Amino acid sequence: MSVAETEAPEQEPEKKKFTFPSALTVLAIVTIGVWLLAFLIPAGQYDRNEDGGPIEGTYHRVPSGQSFMDRLNDLFLSPVNGLYGVQDEKTGQVGPDLSGSLYGSAGVFLFVLAIGAFITVVFATGALDRGIARLAHRLRDRGALLIAGVMVVFSLLGTVEGFAEETLGFYGLLVPMMLALGYDRMVAVGTSILGAGVGVMCSTVNPFATGVASSAAGISLGDGIILRFVMWIVLTAVTIAYVVRYAKRVQKDPSKSIGGFQPGDREQVKKATVGEAPELTRLHKGVLIMVALVFAFMIFSVVPWSSALTGKADATPYRWELGWSFPQLAALFLVAAVLVGLVARMSEPKLSSTIIQGAADFISPALVIMLARGVTVIMNNSKITDTVLHSIEGVVKGTSSAMFAIIVFVVNLPLAFLIPSTSGHATLTMPILAPLADFAGVSRAVVVTAWEASSGWMNLWVPTTAVTIGGVALAKVGYDKYLRFVWPLLAILFVMICGFLALGAAFT
């Protein structure tokens, strides 16, 4: 028998499965798409008031004044302009070599890298991991309290610093813990995804959501914090109650489990609850205290206290108000990263490398912000931003302030699916949505809240987010089963968000 006859038949190559493109790729496609649309959308502009805001009813057509080469140059330089483009005060054009005010996102870009360095240094100390692990172990015999405790911590971290992907590291702890208490794997998934997700959805000062959106909307990070804080408390409580209710039902009757059980799951009951709690040293306690103080100080530094306490948007700031923005916050987190490293007794080489690694890990969301801002530069230079704004104005004109806020929430849902990156989504849409609030007589802070609620609500379930897909994979729970588990809660949250937005718009 010849060699050719003994050879195995060639196997057909496996078909490649479709994977949704990354946020960077989506924004690159959006950039080219917007650039092409700029040839078809007529140029136009509004008259501006003293603050630079558009005046309702003053839209009119104007020539773009751009040649084909000018437009091609804008496309080529869009990422550069998105980072440090400067807007000429007379012409309104944006370019890297013009004179005027900074239009690019350099401040937000550096802030993202700084907070990335800080978070990475904190995780390198092991304090946060041990703190959560100790909490879980201490509450191991009180299942409902354990679920509530972990979800509160995750939600708190989500609302102040966008804690989401970090939850993936806790499945190795939570899955056996939940199984040991007589629950199923879905409880671990709900505790992680929904705990952190509801915090991000109701971000109070989350720099990657509220911070970026507020910057793009031209308002303070602290504007609207009271509405977001109340939303965070109420919606977090509702989400915890939902997960605890399901957990108790499964514990009482395992046949009620939506996710089912893997071989050996039922044998783990009470096995993982023995042993000693992870040690929390004085060093770890010191780091956790520092983290709490840094975020508390950040909140204090950005909140417009005079407006918040008096209810007047134009109230004179108190003497002790700091009124910090992204440059100061970037410096705060860089200094805090160094101080945490010193408290944790890191060596100079380790601290330096950790800070660099942290900035590197967060370069992706920073680049997303840059690219998204580059899209707005193309729209600005071709003078189609006001045309798009004018077309949307016709849709919302005549609606009540409450209905306007709900429309903003609903309109952003499909955009959140296409651009799961909160930073990129905010930078792309806020320059158009924020001026609409002026026409509707609604605070721009309500638009920011509506936007982040839509982004956060979608990211609780869409398959384009690593947190959701990665979480169900690590817990070995089917994505379809997770959707069955979460859809009633999504409906409840949807209705409650609309209610909060309507009230927020009515009282601004």
Image (cartoon, rainbow, N blue to C red):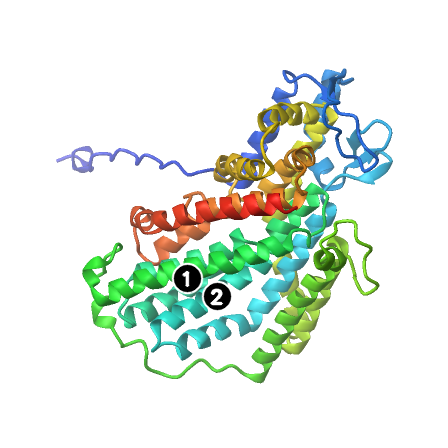
Residue 447 at x, y = what percent?
A: 62, 42
Identify which residue is drawn at 41% across, 74% down: 136
Q: CA distance from mark 2 to mark 1?
A: 8 Å
Q: Can you give x and y, in whole percent of width and height, for residue 56 in the image? A: 72, 27
Residue 143, x across and y down, in percent: 34, 72
Q: Which residue is mark 2?
A: 152
Q: Is residue 359 visible?
A: yes
Task: Determine contact: label 2, label 1, CB under 8 Å.
Answer: yes
Picture quarter with the N terminus: top left
Nearer-the-camera pick, 172 or 16: 172
The residue under label 1 is 240
Residue 141 in which image quadrant: bottom left
Q: Is residue 459 visible?
A: no
Who comes first in sequence, dot 2 or dot 1?
2
Is 93 left or right of 230, judged from the image as shown? right
Q: Tell me the number on the disc at residue 430.
A: none
Query: Three-letter amino acid code at disc 1?
Result: Ile
Quadrant housing residue 273: bottom left
Residue 84 x, y percent position in the rendering: 76, 41
Badge 2 amino acid: Val
| Secondary structure beneath label 2 | helix
Dot 2, crowdedness within 10 Å: few (<14), some or many (≥20)? many
